[in-house]
Amino acid sequence: MMRITIDGKQIALEEPITVLEAASREGIYIPTLCNHSLLKPDGNCRVCLVEVKNIPKLQTACTLNVFDGMVVETNTEEVVRARIGMLEFLLTNHPFHCPVCNRSGDCELQDLVNRYGVHSGRYREDKRRIENRCVDPIIARNMDRCIMCSRCVRMCHDVQGAYAIDIVGRGSESRIEAFSEERYDCEYCGNCIAVCPTASFLSRPELHTSQAWQITDEIDTVCSYCGVGCSMTLKMRDGDIISLYSKEDYGVNRGILCVRGRFGYDYVKSQKREHRPRIRKNGKLFRVSWDEAIEYVAEELGNIRDKYGGDSVGAVASVHSTNEANYLLQKFMRSVIGTNNIDSIARLSFAGAQRFLEGLLWDDVTTTPLDEIEKCDTIFVIGGDPTVISPILGIKVRSAYRNGANILTLYDIPGLRRFTTLSVKTPSVGEEAFLEHLSLYVYREKKSRGRIKPLDEWLLEREASLKEKKDLTTNSVSFYRLLELLLRSEHLAIIIGPDIIQRADGFRLLTPIAALIYLFGAKVYLMSEFPNEQGVVDVGCIPDGLPIHRGIDDVENRRNLEHLWDRAIPEKMGLTLMEMLEMAKRGELKALYVMGENPAFTLPNNHSVIEALRELDLLIVQDIFLTETAALSHVFLPSTSWAEEDGTYTNIEGRVQRLRKAKESRAMENWKIIREISNAMGYIMDYDKSEDVFKEMYPSMSMEDIGAGGFMQSYEIKKRIEKIPRPKKPQAGFIEGVIELRIKRELFQLGSYSGESNMLLSISSSPLLMVSSDVFKRYNLSDETEVEIGSALGTMRLNVKEDLSLPEDCVALSNSFRDK
């Protein structure tokens, strides 16, 4: 225990911290310009000088650690004179642009100058002028205003790990420069903008849109992109979103945002938004009133249900919509339509993997707190780049590497290239054999934990087959090095991405991964491309389950819900998403209700998907844009975006977090549309606001009870996998002359909504065909060469780029660009 005194106040401390932090904890103000809660102390601005008893010179509070008996004065005459002197030095070169500066009223330097009365300096020199060589569509830079606090550089290097900018020059010629010419070659996270204390870094699209005193409200909410669930605060001006930022002490991201979260919000303001319903008449979609649209949907759905039965209708829930809207959709399908035909695109990646791993291993195996990853000594990344798919998860992996963790990757992962201990490459069709051998070699060393019978049986069976045949994967030096590093680990985390899951042989790859999790007792993280993949599963938008992960065959739970809903729930298992489309193509599924999804664009083999959708007697699409799927619909219902309704999302940790309505819309909220249709069909949903739906899901809570970090929910999996399914046919081998096409995940474009963001499109507006090194050399290609690629579905021309992360005989193409 240490006891110190600051400004006469005695403080007891358990551990040594800086004077600045100790003062901050006690509410004692010490000014600073270079220090930031997310960064290591640097002490270069000298504004935080304090007086310490028995130390002759003034000390920087941000770098000086406390010691027992220390006496500190923060506001003596000498301290104030020194601070004024430092501010005068800073103002020597700083231009007085305050009346026209975008940060005026929200500038830390301006605040300190006003606080200490430094309205003019004693130093008379010409203001420096630094030419801005970088003309970027997103990041605006003004080095004339820079005070060289180095916050931006330290953020880029030490937190983000992008290393895109640095300090160049010496003395008065020092400045911040990018390692690129006309545009930034970086991840565009914008965190340099967030930590800049002046206006040296700014968001170009937000320049001169408002001043600090014109902000009328600030709304705390959650990001609408990936499944990490980053907290953010929207700055509002007269009901419009002007900009956003993230608070350092708030949420899972602690002040850090990625490019999609920081700049991709402008799709909400897109001129392409629809606000009035449409009904197809004579082959065209015509705008109608809400009353007419609701009445039409209710009548047509009722007719199809009564004529063909409830199982002739299906629904697609939304990984973009709130838990409340998804809960009502599955309740509507089960209580009003009388079917369990409800699913979502989460099944094709996140939900499918989660169901398999939790059914095979243990409850909550995939909902590990994100903060735990930085405590692991080894992290094995399989199936995608977390810095692209779930960027803040990727930042935490980089942080773990800096803390001494071994980062192991299957294939080269570009976003972790600087932060990888070992990268192992296998042929794309050899992944199953590689992972299987890896799990068996670990099994030989660690032996079974004797708790999970299906995996014990699988390991014994596969070990017996391994003795009969030798595989070339075990001849690799990197294989044994990977095995060695894994066996040395004490706290292992395995991060699984969609590139492993979204495969025809996905479960075959997940089985040996599950064996590794089992043998090591590893923490598991599933990368999630969308904001509420966990939520759609939790609230029951699956054909074989009910809310809170209860099976359709759970009689007690089904009866409880029937009592709550006052309707019988079908006992027959429903159709999956792909089964619904297949039934539609055969004419057996007559109607489909699609909420907040665009299967005609996002699903593979979209020609077949479009063919199936055209066979429907009734296609209802509820979305914020008139998407490719909506263009095929019989009824289009315009809904609100994430910023225009209250509700909750559930992130990959299982953390339920609050969305708050920030702006009004002429469209209707998702949950409210479902309520109106249900009421029109005779089943009264008596909800006045989304919180009423939330209370039905969580009776002991209200939305107001959800704090800054949300709340973690847990659940029990009652139905376990009793035997691991055997593959129906062996894994495909190499086919000479055939190149595998994979999905390329883009940092700047991921999902259909990012394609409507002008800010994101200004960074990346067209895709590149990424080509594996062997194919690149075989065809004598060079970067930006235009090539023609073709498959059974058609051909297109694209520019190419070599991708070292791809396995042999493989190319990758993004599915997020509408023109390709």
Image: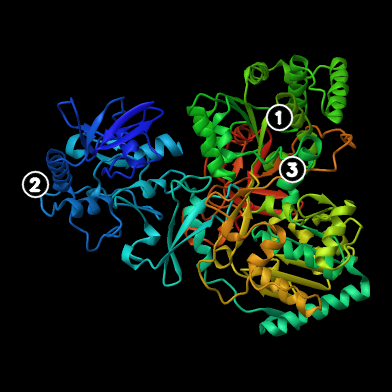
Relative to 245, residue 692 above or below: below
Label number found at residue 427: 1
Q: CA distance from mark 2 to mark 3?
A: 64 Å
First of labels 2, 3 by sequence position: 2
> What's under tag 3, amino acid-wise?
Gln
Specify the quadrant that holds the C terminus.
Answer: bottom right
Query: Horizontal and vertical percent for residue 486?
Result: 65, 21
Q: Residues within 10 Å of mark 3 (few under 14, many from 20)?
A: many
**Residue on which the image places disc 3:** 354
Task: Identify the residue at image location x=58%, y=67%.
Answer: 645
Secondary structure at badge 3 equals: helix
**Residue on which the image places disc 2:** 125
In screen coordinates, is 212 left or right of 386?
A: left
Label number found at residue 775: none
Of the pair 228 and 193, the residue shown nearer to us: 228
In screen coordinates, is 13 left or right of 303?
A: left
Query: Horizontal and vertical percent for residue 505?
Result: 80, 39
Q: Is residue 454 visible?
A: yes
